[in-house]
Image (spheres, helix red, strand yellow):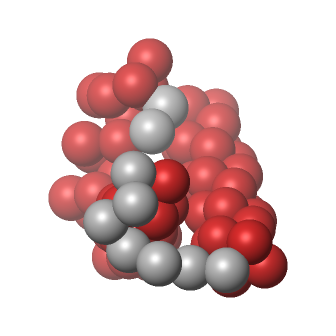
Amino acid sequence: MLHEYRDEIHELKQSNAHFANIFDKHNALDKQVEDAEAGRTVLTDVELETLKKEKLLLKDEAYKMILDYKKA
């Protein structure tokens, strides 16, 4: 997620527990989506779309936090 901000992500994960939690949740959801799309986990289309939307919301929140961090 957001590989171009690798340094900022590392700093935020160390200094901001909320960011670390968002980042970890996003990665867990990413794994669930990947498993479902590869057929390793069975999910309905609605469940898969829900996971994808939740993942996107977390990514958007993390991105905003990164941009705010860069401004500071």
Q: Is residue 61 visible?
A: no
The vertical placement of 32 against 10, above or below, is below
**Quadrant location, the C terminus:** top right
Asked if residue 68 lies left or right of residue 25, the reply is right
Residue positioned 49% across, 54% down in the render: 37
Residue positioned 40% across, 60% down in the render: 39
Which quadrant of the structure image shows residue 3?
top left
Asked if residue 1 lies left or right of residue 51, the reply is left
Q: Is residue 47 visible?
A: yes
Give x and y (percent) for residue 61: 67, 59
**Quadrant location, the N terminus:** top left
Give x and y (percent) for residue 42: 47, 78
Which one is in front, 26 or 64?
26
Check the image and name the residue furthest to the top. Answer: 4
Give x and y (percent) for residue 50: 73, 76
Which quadrant of the structure image shows residue 67?
top right
Give x and y (percent) for residue 11: 27, 44
